[in-house]
């Protein structure tokens, strides 16, 4: 699979710290307790100092984490050094509730979204999930564009060579990322359905895809090949999670519906230091997807800095950066 043409670093991606190098970015979740909040910010400082292209913040089912998510996003925006991406979910929401929330995020200064259908609320099985006004994530993509355009249809742009002169042009564009599933969404009946869904999201205005976690580089590289053949042109960023324990592995498979990576399970069980096994496995995966042409990597952090930074350090993406001790 090496050498697969996957595309240049995405124009739609919030700016990367080092042009010409693969980008890296992180996912955080909003803290659910005071203790978790206390632990988050020192980790966040370390992650910010590494120079990511952006940091995304998840959103709880049914908007359950709205305030906590916005707090973390506002913190990131205040630093002014790293673009912030807000996950935003449609599940069980009406059009008017979602429009109001999108406005609230835009007012806070967020201009990057990850538009998602959303996980079912706790205790609700996937096949009994009742959707609100939105049938899918692509309808949410359309809504975010519509709200942003209505809010800022025009903008004054500088005229090169004429200091002080302004011309009216279209308003600020938002980055709208969407989810992609290299091994299929649990509710999808076929690969073709997953590809059609991704294509529909791009047609609705999405300009970046971020994948569900996976454990084999070929899962991602093969999916990207198929997506390109199906007509998807937006960059597809691989989502990678360092798995630091057997317990964590079981939990993420439960949440994602991914199949058990048998070799990783064996290696985690056999080692006295499972964290280093998970870091080495994730680093190898990063090397393989980048060698195959991925434009960058999006690391799931579980709100910790050590493991994602160790992975990036192992693959040489941190060499010129200063990480405070
Ligand atoms: P869609 O694109 O709408 O659908 C995904 C798939 O489901 C498609 O294959 C579609 O064909 C099929 N499908 C959808 N509805 C039906 C139906 N009614 N009948 C049959 N098939 C159907 N969840 C959160 O709650 N908060 C988060 O912050 C969050 N962050 C995420 C970040 C990433 C990178 C990823 C990959 C997932 C994230 N999720 C999050 C999980 C996501 O919300 C779920 O995976 C959800 O089940 C699908 O979301 P989607 O946006 O891909 O949905």
Image (tube, helix red, strand yellow):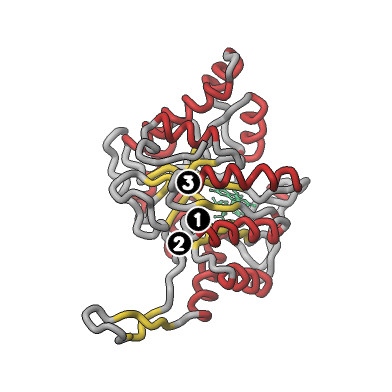
Q: Is residue 188 visible?
A: no
Rendered location of residue 142, percent (x, y): 51, 69
**Reading the chain from its start, which is encountered first: label 1 or label 3?**
3
Residue with the most extreme right position: 123
In front: 147, or 225? 147
Q: Is 127 on the left or on the right of 267, as rendered?
A: right
The x, y position of residue 296, in whole percent, is 39, 44
- Position of 99 relative to 185 (above/below): below
Number of the front mark, 2 or 3: 3
Residue at image mark 3: 49
Residue for badge 1? 178
* Eye-nearest disc, 1 or 3: 3
Q: Is mark 1 within 8 Å of ligand 1?
A: yes
Whole-percent x and y of residue 117? 60, 57
On screen, residue 260 above or below 195:
above
Give the mark nearest the N terminus, 2 or 1: 1
* Viewport quadrant of the N terminus: top left
């Amino acid at each position: 699979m090496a050498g697969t043409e996957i595309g240049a670093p995405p124009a739609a991606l919030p700016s990367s710290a080092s042009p010409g190098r693969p980008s890296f970015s992180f996912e955080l979740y909003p803290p659910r307790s005071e203790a978790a909040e206390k632990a988050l910010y020192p980790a966040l400082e370390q992650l910010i100092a590494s120079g990511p292209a952006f940091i995304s913040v998840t959103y709880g089912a049914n908007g359950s984490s709205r305030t906590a998510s916005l707090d973390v996003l506002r913190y990131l925006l205040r630093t002014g050094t790293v673009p912030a991406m807000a996950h935003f979910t449609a599940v069980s929401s009406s059009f008017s509730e979602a429009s109001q929330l999108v406005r609230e995020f835009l007012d806070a200064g967020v201009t990057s979204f990850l538009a998602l259908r959303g996980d079912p609320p706790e205790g609700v099985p996937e096949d009994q999930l009742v959707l609100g006004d939105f049938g899918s994530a692509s309808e949410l993509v359309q809504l975010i564009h519509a709200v942003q355009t209505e809010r800022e249809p025009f903008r004054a742009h500088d005229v090169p060579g004429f200091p002080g002169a302004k011309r009216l042009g279209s308003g600020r564009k938002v980055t709208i990322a969407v989810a992609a599933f290299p091994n299929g969404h649990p509710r999808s009946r076929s690969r073709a359905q997953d590809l059609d869904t991704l294509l529909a999201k791009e047609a609705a205005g999405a300009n970046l895809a971020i994948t569900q976690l996976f454990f084999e580089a070929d899962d991602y590289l093969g999916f990207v090949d198929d997506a390109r053949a199906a007509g998807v042109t937006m960059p597809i960023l691989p989502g990678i999670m360092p798995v630091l324990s057997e317990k964590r592995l079981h939990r993420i498979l439960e949440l994602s519906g991914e199949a058990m990576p048998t070799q990783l399970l064996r290696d985690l069980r056999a080692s006295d230091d499972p964290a280093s096994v998970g870091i080495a496995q994730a680093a190898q995966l990063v090397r393989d997807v980048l060698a195959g042409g991925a434009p960058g990597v999006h690391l799931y952090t579980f709100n910790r800095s050590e493991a994602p930074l160790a992975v990036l350090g192992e693959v040489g993406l941190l060499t010129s950066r200063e990480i405070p001790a």
